[in-house]
Image: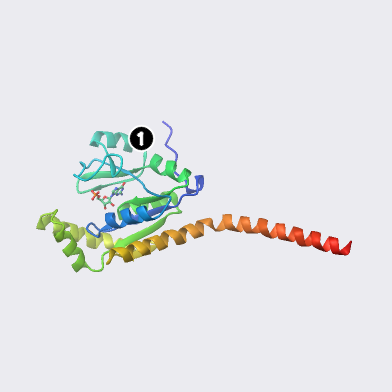
């Protein structure tokens, strides 16, 4: 069977922003706020075998699928990357990326550091952003404060967080998430700066046309004077 085509950033003009954070850093709130505030920015929706949580919608937060459906997709090579976290599988479908990038939409990929490494190897031109809590003490407080997990699970999440945060050093940008408004502004600034970088060739092309137009006019002007 033919391998599904790898998404390629050059197919469209969308930028892929890969965002990782340790569990409990508050990434979801931050990303939702930035998507609300910036135009042409969408979440990439992952497939997962995890059951939906009370506040989650199918096809909006995740595509919730069974382990056997996940396995079928995996064996057909339909995932750009996939991983297993706490016994559940998560994967980014290649079609999810190519469809949106070709439509010129910038994409936010919320994946762990393993997924980020894989995306970087596969796509080359991605922007990697890591969201860090201001300290481990604050992270512990946030994890316990959520009241979602037992002390044992909190300990596990903290141990994972330490390991995961060590991976942040090879990301392009680090954003310390202390106050939400500040972190939102920083993330928006990174996205806007990368958009300016992406738009540079198009702007230069336009400027060349403008220059040629004005050169043409000057040339005509000189001809007229001479005549
Ligand atoms: P949660 O179950 O809390 O929604 O997500 C658990 C972890 O899985 C988070 O660290 C999240 O970034 C990661 N994750 C979600 N979707 C994907 C995916 O498609 N690929 C990878 N590699 N990680 C994912």
**Nearest the eye: 135 or 60:** 60
Decide which of 104, 139 is in the foreground and name it.
104
Q: Is residue 69 above or below residue 216?
A: above
SS category of the residue bearing label 1: loop
Count of numbered tags = 1
Residue 181 location, x and y as percent? 31, 64
Q: Nearer the viewer, residue 2 or 20?
A: 20
Query: Which image quarter holds the C terminus?
Result: bottom right
Residue under the point 37% across and 55% down = 37
Q: Residue 174's image quarter?
A: bottom left
Instruction: Using residue 72 as the reference point, say whether residue 120 is left or right of it.
Output: right
- Residue at the limit of the structure toward the left, as seen here: 151
Seen from this angle, which residue lies furthest top?
1
The picture places residue 144, in percent across and down from the top left corner, at: 14, 60
Q: What kind of colouring is applied to the model shown?
A: rainbow
The quadrant the N terminus occupies is top left
Crowding around mark 1 (Cα neighbors within 10 Å: few <14, some 14 to 19, many 20+) is: few
Residue 220 left/right relative to 142: right
Q: Is residue 203 above or below residue 92?
A: below
In this image, 182 relative to 144: left or right?
right
Vertical placement of residue 40 versus 158, above or below: above
Question: Picture coordinates of residue 11 (x, y %)?
Answer: 50, 44
Q: Position of residue 191 (x, y in %)?
A: 42, 58
- Indicate yes or no: mark 1 CB to ligand 1 under 8 Å: no
Q: Which residue ends up furthest to the right in the rendered image?
A: 227
Which residue is label 1 attached to? 76
Determine which quarter of the picture holds residue 19. bottom left
- Quarter of the rendering containing residue 210: bottom right
Residue found 20% across the figure and 49% down from its top: 86
């Amino acid at each position: 069977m033919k391998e599904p085509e790898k998404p390629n950033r050059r197919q469209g003009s969308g930028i892929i922003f890969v965002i990782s954070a340790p569990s409990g850093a508050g990434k979801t709130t931050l990303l939702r706020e930035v998507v609300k505030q910036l135009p042409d920015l969408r979440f990439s929706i992952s497939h997962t075998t995890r059951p939906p949580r009370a506040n989650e919608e199918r096809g909006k937060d995740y595509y919730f699928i069974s382990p056997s459906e996940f396995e079928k997709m995996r064996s057909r090579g339909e995932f750009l990357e996939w991983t297993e976290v706490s016994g559940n599988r998560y994967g980014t479908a290649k079609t999810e990326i190519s469809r949106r990038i070709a439509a010129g939409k910038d994409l936010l990929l919320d994946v762990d550091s393993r997924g980020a490494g894989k995306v970087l190897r596969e796509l080359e031109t991605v922007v990697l952003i890591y969201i860090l809590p201001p300290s481990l003490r604050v992270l512990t407080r946030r994890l316990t404060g959520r009241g979602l997990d037992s002390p044992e699970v909190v300990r596990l999440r903290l141990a994972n967080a330490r390991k995961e945060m060590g991976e942040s050093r090879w990301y392009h940008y680090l954003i310390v998430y202390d106050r939400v408004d500040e972190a939102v502004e920083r993330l928006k600034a990174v996205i806007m700066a990368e958009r300016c970088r992406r738009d540079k060739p198009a702007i230069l092309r336009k400027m060349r046309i403008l220059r040629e137009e004005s050169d043409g006019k000057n040339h005509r002007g000189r001809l007229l004077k001479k005549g």
